[in-house]
Amino acid sequence: MTAQPATGADYALTSGTRIYADPGAEGVAQYLAGVLRPATGYPLPVQAGPGTGISLLLTGTDPNPEGYQLDVTSSKVVLRARTAAGLFQGVQTLRQLLPAKVESPTAQPGPWPVAGGHVVDRPRYAYRGAMLDVARHFRPVADVKRYIDEVARYKINHLHLHLTDDQGWRLVINSWPRLATYGGSTQVGGGPGGYYTQADYTAIVAYAAARHITVVPEVDMPGHINAALASYAELNCDGKAPPLYTGVEVGFSSLCVDKELTYRFVEDVVAELAALTPGPYLHLGGDEATSTTPADYARFVNRVQAIAQAHGKTVLGWHDVVNATPLPTTVAQYWGTETSHAKVAAATKKGTKLIMSPASKAYLDMKYTSSTPLGQDWAGLIEVKTSYNWNPGAFLSGVDPSAVHGIEAPIWTETLASQRDIEYMAFPRLAALAELGWSPWSTHDWNTFKVRLGAQGPRWKAAGVTYYRSPQVPWATS
């Protein structure tokens, strides 16, 4: 990233400002107007451009599809990119150049200066993800959309939805309706649970796509599957359905690998999910399948990879899938706490790409300190500095940096029962992890980052985002 501030070159946003958009950039322009209108109260009409105001132009030359150039002078703002996705990421930077109160959902007094300068920027990784677990505690559509908006501010471009687990199945599968109506009827602690209709899921996917975020749905198997086993007795080896589960232990459930019905079930689920999901990935889980023998696990994973591939999808799986035979296209998500893993390293030498989510660095549900009232600590305590001070490209020994396709920040919800809980655990750490995914390692510096992070506090306050005021961060007051 190149950023050159220009003193005395601020652009003044006024009631007469217009947003100009090239053909193909209108969606990003409307998004920008929608972000700015509530706090400023200005109409900010969108029209064909360029013009004297804010221009979004598809004339960028950066070969990276998310690269952009932003120029702010006293007379105009010009944002250039080769794609709409690049313009969208540039818009997030433009927001940062306005006063923090621009994030308020209600009208605020001006003035509204955009800090002058020149920015040229592009991402380090193509995949920058946030995972939301809606299986342990269900979140309604409105909450998922809110989280999408919150992570979009930090140039996250994938939302991994953990849709199924022992405690709940959260998406209607028309060919197996009891998965949702029965398997989705509870959650951790015995609450009412819930599920998404296919129309709900489609709405989430469309909302994310408008923010240039790709939804990655996860159906975890062969373990973490009790909600499905409880819904359909015939999926069990003994033909007997277990009770619904509302606890938090893992590793006790497994699909019946020897039953041909199991693969018809997987085929039906994958077919419906693939048809609803325009993005390239299906996440098939594969973690903590301790009730499945290693041989059965490998046989199952190899077969379901082929099913997903037959439906035109690239398989994502937790890194346990390296215990099978990953397809050349399969991507493994590393969630371990160790900095070496011989089987993962060996898989990368055969072409397997990695998403880095080491639990000791990237799991947003880990407690900040021993006194944090929410979260878990099995992977350690993760204060903000810990979440920031690691290199995704060099974390695993024996893995070439080129094997790392990206980074993801998962948030598991065993202990998180509300949207407020989720926000408190995600922020500020999600912003730290997002920077690791976006910015080159050569710019990594905790002392400068913590000051920039502290400047986000007033923005979260204005937007109504709950966050942890880490004592490691010098929080700005305005």
Image (cartoon, helix red, strand yellow):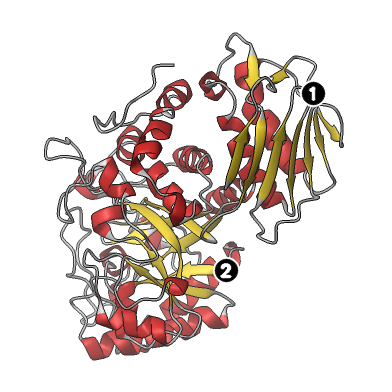
Classify residue 435 as left or right of residue 370.
right
Q: Is residue 350 above or below residue 444?
A: below
Q: Are there few (<14), some (14-19), or many (20+) residues within 10 Å of tag 1? A: few
Label 2's element?
loop
Q: Position of residue 4 (x, y in %)?
A: 62, 36
Disc nearest the viewer among 2 and 1: 1
Query: Could you tell which of marks 2 and 1 lies nearer the N-terminus?
Result: 1
Q: Which mark is residue 166?
A: none
Q: Position of residue 159 (x, y in %)?
A: 48, 53
Task: Answer yes or no: is residue 139 visible.
Answer: no
Label pair 2/1, CB-CB below 8 angstroms: no
- The amino acid beneath tag 2 is Pro
* x 43%, y 29%: residue: 456
Label 1's element?
loop
- The amino acid beneath tag 1 is Ser
Q: Position of residue 5 (x, y in %)?
A: 61, 31
Quadrant of the drawing holding the C terminus = top left
Task: Answer yes or no: is residue 313 visible.
Answer: yes
Q: Position of residue 339 (x, y in %)?
A: 24, 68
Q: Which residue is mark 1?
A: 75
Q: Are there few (<14), some (14-19), or many (20+) residues within 10 Å of tag 2? A: some
Picture quadrant of residue 303: bottom left
Q: Nearer the viewer, residue 392 or 34?
A: 392
Q: Nearer the viewer, residue 274 or 175?
A: 274
* x 27%, y 67%: residue: 224
Q: Which residue is mark 2?
A: 280
